Image: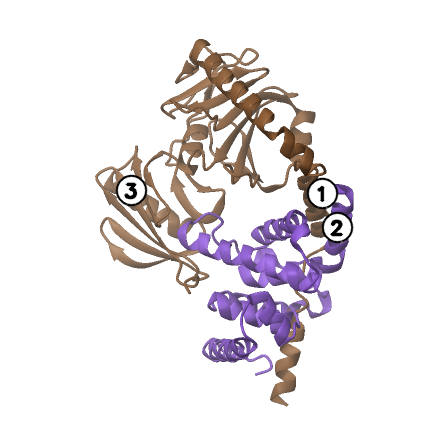
């Protein structure tokens, strides 16, 4: 029984690791903490697997778990200075496309840093919708919001990011 | 056209991800965590037995306490008479007791039943096995400490332990002494106070002739090593008693913050209260000296909702 649960969760890990990792990284902006929260997401999934009723897709369910963990982490960081910022330059993944590295690395890191400066709700909706390519319905399900709230918040979040890029002189694609 | 560029921008951001090595490490951690979890295969049987188990556990726990009370009290303070295979040690950390369990020495705060750390002698192989088998996230050699000291930080993520500090000090070519400290059972400042004032019997310590500062493992702010926590709460204010406090020491400390690396810049302040902002804009810290009390006030401008 436990073996089956483990096998199932590890299968999900192989399938959805990249999505969950990237989502948490954009939410937290700290590689070490990101790894911890990815671990915790799959451990929570393992523990709660009996309550997973297949009414939502596995990926959506995993995002919901990860969302609770990152929001909790963001709250903790407000109260506690543990795991304070680690230099973003150390967080560049080595799997980055090396040919694009020089031209785009700076831009991607800039955007990662700017996304960190958004309100958590804006971060959530931008990451899920624009980076993870979730549908509005999926985002609504993950965040437990109405679809209308997803659309409105996304629009405000994009405006906010755009403003930051204008102020900061972000000129890539704008 | 603008929209097309905008969409291309998102495509670029999707490239950010992890390496295969990171994925392998996390996979291993998840599997280890799953294997450490209690089995849930027979919930009904467990339900039937749980009263008996609970009663037995209570007997064991109370028996344990009784045994502890009857047993000799743990040794006090400086361990001057205590030996782990020929070595004893002392430090400036106060109100600490030690108790031998097997080959290990457990460290306790006075009157606390739960240990906050351990001391062990390990071989180089054992040390390497420990380092490789734990999810270590920081590896750093501490400069100007009394002995060559290598620090590792493990993310433990247990209910009462967030992170575990490991310090390894070579005794001989093959033997190392290992200290571990569990945060938050012991505060960062106490950990570094202990290790920076350590004296091993029979092994002459190095005394650095300038003030010593450390980051607390994470983050880039440096702290004097001789701080004793007075009030470290979760409301972003930390107050310490600074053994080496003086106006001169305070000013030297501020200079060190600005010049030891380029991660902090002065934002405002004068005299004995000054504010520094991290260059990345994520953290602002006001550091004030009042008598021998050093106060840190933390702000996180970009993390508020």
Mark 2 crowdedness (10 Å alpha carbons): few <14, some 14-19, many ≥20? some
Disc 1 + disc 2, Cβ < 8 Å: yes
Q: Position of residue A140 (x, y in %)?
A: 58, 71
| Residue B294 disc label | 3
Q: Quadrant of the N terminus of chain A?
A: top right
Q: Quadrant of the C terminus of chain A?
A: bottom right
Gap between marks 3 and 2, in whole Å? Answer: 49 Å
Q: Compared with residue B54, is residue B235 higher up or lower down, i.e. above or below?
A: below
Q: Which residue is mark 1?
A: B31
| Residue B105 disc label | none
The tint chain A carries is purple
Horizontal side of residue A140 vs B95, given as left or right: right
Q: For residue A68, what is the image quadrant?
A: bottom right
A114 or A157: nearer the eye? A157
Q: Which residue is mark 2?
A: A10
A29 or B122: nearer the eye? A29
Where disc 2 sits, the SS reads helix
Where disc 1 sits, the SS reads helix
Which tag, 3 or 1, sits closer to the chain's start?
A: 1
Q: Is residue B132 visible?
A: no
Where disc 3 sits, the SS reads strand
Q: Position of residue B74 (x, y in %)?
A: 44, 14
Gap between marks 1 and 2, in whole Å? Answer: 8 Å
Circle 2 chain: A
Horizontal side of residue B282 vs B140, given as left or right: left
Q: For residue B57, what is the image quadrant?
A: top right
- According to the colouring, which chain is brown? B
């Amino acid at each position: 029984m436990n073996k089956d649960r483990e096998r199932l969760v590890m299968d999900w890990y192989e399938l959805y690791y990249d999505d969950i990792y990237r989502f948490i990284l954009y939410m937290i902006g700290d590689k070490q903490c990101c790894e911890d929260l990815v671990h915790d997401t799959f451990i929570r999934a393992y523990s709660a697997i009996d309550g997973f009723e297949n009414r939502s897709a596995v990926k959506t369910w995993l995002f919901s778990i990860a969302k609770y963990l990152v929001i909790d982490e963001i709250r903790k960081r407000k109260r506690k200075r543990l795991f304070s910022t680690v230099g973003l330059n150390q967080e560049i993944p080595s799997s980055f496309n090396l040919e694009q590295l020089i031209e785009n690395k700076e831009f991607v890191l800039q955007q990662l840093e700017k996304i960190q400066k958004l309100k958590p709700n804006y971060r959530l909706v931008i990451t899920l919708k624009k980076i993870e390519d979730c549908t509005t319905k999926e985002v609504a399900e993950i965040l437990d919001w109405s679809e209308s709230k997803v659309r409105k918040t996304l629009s405000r979040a994009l405006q906010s990011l755009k403003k930051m890029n204008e102020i900061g002189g972000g000129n890539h694609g704008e | 056209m603008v929209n097309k560029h905008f969409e291309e921008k998102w495509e670029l951001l999707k490239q950010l991800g992890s390496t295969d090595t990171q994925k392998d490490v996390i996979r291993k951690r998840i599997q280890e965590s799953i294997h450490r979890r209690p089995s849930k295969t027979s919930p009904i049987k467990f339900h039937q037995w749980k009263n008996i188990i609970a009663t037995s556990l209570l007997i064991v726990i109370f028996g344990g306490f009784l045994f502890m009370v009857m047993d000799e009290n743990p040794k006090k303070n400086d361990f001057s008479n205590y030996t782990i295979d020929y070595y004893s040690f002392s430090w400036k950390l106060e109100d600490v007791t030690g108790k031998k369990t097997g080959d290990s020495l457990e460290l306790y705060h006075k009157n606390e039943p739960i240990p906050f750390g351990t001391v062990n002698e390990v071989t180089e192989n054992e040390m390497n096995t420990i380092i490789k088998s734990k999810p270590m996230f920081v590896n750093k050699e501490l400069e100007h400490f009394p002995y060559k000291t290598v620090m590792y930080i493990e993310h433990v993520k247990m209910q009462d332990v967030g992170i575990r500090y490991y310090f390894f000090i070579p005794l001989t070519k093959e033997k190392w002494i290992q200290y571990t400290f569990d945060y938050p059972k012991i505060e960062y400042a106490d950990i570094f106070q202990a290790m920076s004032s350590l004296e091993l019997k029979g092994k002459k310590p190095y005394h650095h002739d300038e003030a010593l500062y450390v980051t607390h493992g994470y983050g880039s702010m440096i702290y004097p090593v001789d701080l004793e926590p007075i009030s470290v709460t979760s409301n972003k204010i930390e107050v310490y008693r600074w053994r080496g406090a003086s106006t001169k020491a305070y000013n030297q400390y501020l200079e060190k913050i600005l010049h030891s690396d380029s991660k902090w810049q002065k934002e405002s302040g004068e005299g004995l209260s000054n504010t520094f902002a991290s260059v990345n804009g994520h953290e602002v810290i006001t550091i004030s000296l009042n008598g021998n009390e050093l106060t840190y006030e933390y702000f996180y401008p970009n993390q508020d909702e």
